[in-house]
Image: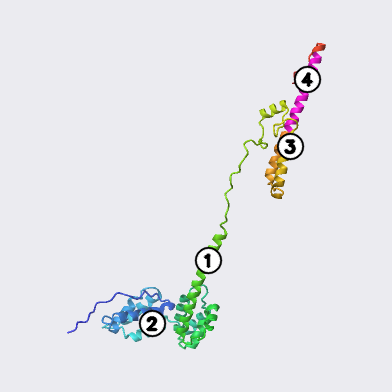
Amino acid sequence: MTTVSTSELKAGTPFQFNGDPAQARRFLFSVKTYFIMNPTVYNTDVRQVGLALAYMTEGTAGTWAQTYYGDAFSTNPPKFGKWDDFEKAFKEAFSSPDQAGEALSKLRDLKQGSRPLVEYVSAFKALVSQASIKESVVLIEWFCQGLNYGLVTSIYRMENVPTDFDKFVTAAMKMDANWRQGASHRNHAQKNKKGNSNTKYVPRPSASRRDPDAMDVDRTLSPSEKDKAFREGHCFKCNEKGHRVNRCPAKVRKTEKEESKKGKKPVRHAEEQSDDEESDNQDSDDEEDMDVQLTRVTHIKKASTKAKTNGRTPVGKKDF
C-alpha cells in the first residue's frame, strides 16, 4: 500500500494582498502556484478558497474577504463555493476593467534608457502578458519601440534577422552584453590614460658647484660691516676699494654672465629682480646717509676748532 504524504511544503507562500489592482494578477498566480506545490494538501475547493482568503486581510481586500466570509457562514454548513467562482468574483472586484488597454498604454511609454536590457525585457514581458499579445511580429514591433536605437540598428544589420520573438530577444541580449563589456574596457582605458597624462616627470635639481674662492657679491652686509667698509672706503657690494655699490664691477660682470649664458637673455622672476634692486638701492641709500653724516661731522669738527681758537662754545655741538 502506497502512503501519500500530506505534509505542506512551506515554500513560495502567497503574499498579503491589500486590494491593489496592479498586484491582483500576481496574487492569483502566487496562490495557484502554491496549490501546485502542495497538490495533496489543497485538493478541494474549500481548502483552495480558504487559503486565498487567509492572505486577504489588509486594505480593500480585507473588507472584501470579510463580506465573502459572511456569505459563506450564512448557511449551515458553510458554503465557500467552487474555486472557479471565487476566481471570477475576485477578478471582477480587483482587476482593471480594461487591463489590456492599460497595459498597451504602459507599453507605449516603456523605454530601455540606461538600464540593462534584462530589466527592460522583464518589464516588457509582464505588460504584453497583461495585454494578451502573443504574435511574434507584433511583439517584435512593440519591443523595438522601447529598445535603444543602437541595439535595434545592430540587430537589423545581421545577415539573418530573427523573426521569432524569443530569438530576437536573445540576439538583443547578446549584443547589449557585448556593448556594455566593450564600454567598460573603454572607460578603464580612458581612466588609465588620464592618470598617466597627469603624471609628469620632474627632474630633481642637482646641487650647483660653487667656487670656494669666488667672491660672495650677493650677500648683504650687516650694519657693523657697512660701517667698517665705509670707514675703510670699501664697496658695500663686493667689499673692494675704489668704487661705490651703484658702480660695482662685480654686479656688472654677474649681469653680463647671465645674459650670455646659452646665448639667451636670462629670464628672471619679478620678485627676484625686485629683491635685487631693493637691496642695491638700500646699499646706495646707506652710503649716502653715511656721506651726509661724515660731512656733518667734518663741518662740526671744523667749527669746533675755530670756536676754540676764538674762545667760544661751538654752535651745534650739543645737538650733535
Of marks 2 and 1, which one's residue comes earlier in the chain? 2
Please tell me in which quadrant of the rendered image residue 197 appears.
bottom right
In the rendered image, which residue does mark 2 sit on? 90
Tell me the quadrant of the picture where the N terminus can be found. bottom left
In the rendered image, which residue does mark 4 sit on? 300
SS at circle 4:
helix
Q: Amino acid at mark 1?
A: Ala
Tell me the quadrant of the picture where the C terminus can be found. top right
Name the residue located 66 percent from the left edge and 27 percent from the top edge.
224
Instruction: Report the front residue among 144 and 296.
Output: 296
Of marks 4 and 3, which one's residue comes earlier in the chain? 3
Name the residue located 70 percent from the left edge and 34 percent from the top edge.
238
Measured along the vertical axis of the image, is residue 297 above or below residue 175? above
Magenta includes 294? yes
Q: Nearer the viewer, mark 2 or mark 4?
A: 4
x and y percentages locating residue 201 in the rendered image: 57, 55
Q: Amino acid at mark 4?
A: Ile
Distance from Cα at disc 4 to Cα at disc 1? 86 Å
Distance from Cα at disc 3 to Cα at disc 2? 110 Å
x and y percentages locating residue 33 in the rendered image: 34, 80
Residue 73 visible within the image:
no
